[in-house]
């Protein structure tokens, strides 16, 4: 298993960052509805646990929106671990655009 750990700083305020992040997961689900199944997200305050299956591989993780950053930690199973770098880069790019 590969672990992905990302922290994206922002200066838009915690409430606005939280609002934006909460729109992101449904957008990703809609954009990739053919590739993602068993999509789940559970918010508790500023934190979210999520999971989904992509091409038969389950990916799960957590997001936390702090005062100055959005932190994401995810576990990528072995079959998809060779793509962990690409997944990390894609998340960083999308989150940076979202939070600026």
Image (tube, rainbow, N blue to C red):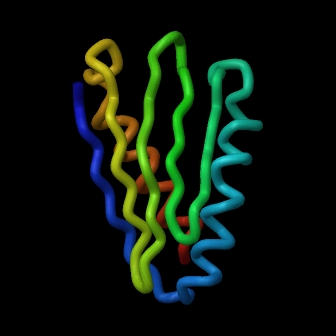
Q: How many numbered marks does the figure carry?
A: 0
Q: Residue visible at 64% across and 31% down?
A: 39
Image coords of residue 58 (percent x, y): 46, 22
Considering depth in this image, is 54 or 92 the residue closer to the camera? 54
Q: Residue farthest to the front?
A: 44
Query: Seen in the image, is 83 located left or right of residue 47?
Result: left
Considering depth in this image, is 6 or 93 the residue closer to the camera? 6
Query: On screen, 62 above or below 51?
Result: below
Q: Quadrant of the N terminus?
A: top left
Q: Quadrant of the C terminus?
A: bottom right
Q: Residue visible at 52% across and 35% down?
A: 51
Q: Residue visible at 42% across and 43% down?
A: 61
Image coords of residue 27 (percent x, y): 72, 47
Query: On screen, 34 above or below 13?
Result: above
Tell me which corner region of the image, top left, top right, bottom left or bottom right, holds residue 72: bottom left
Query: Seen in the image, is 32 located left or right of residue 89?
Result: right
Q: Residue visible at 39% across and 37% down?
A: 87
Query: Seen in the image, is 52 located left or right of residue 3?
Result: right
Image coords of residue 67 (percent x, y): 44, 85
Image coords of residue 15 (percent x, y): 62, 83
């Amino acid at each position: 298993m590969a672990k992905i750990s990302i922290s994206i700083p922002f200066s838009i305020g915690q409430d606005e960052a939280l609002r934006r992040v909460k729109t992101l997961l449904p957008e990703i689900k809609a954009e990739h509805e053919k590739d993602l199944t068993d999509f789940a997200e559970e918010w508790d305050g500023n934190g979210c646990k999520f999971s989904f299956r992509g091409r038969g591989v389950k990916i799960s993780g957590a997001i936390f929106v702090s005062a100055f950053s959005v932190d994401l930690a995810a576990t990528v199973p072995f079959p998809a671990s060779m793509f962990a770098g690409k997944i990390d880069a894609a998340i960083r790019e999308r989150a940076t655009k979202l939070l600026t």
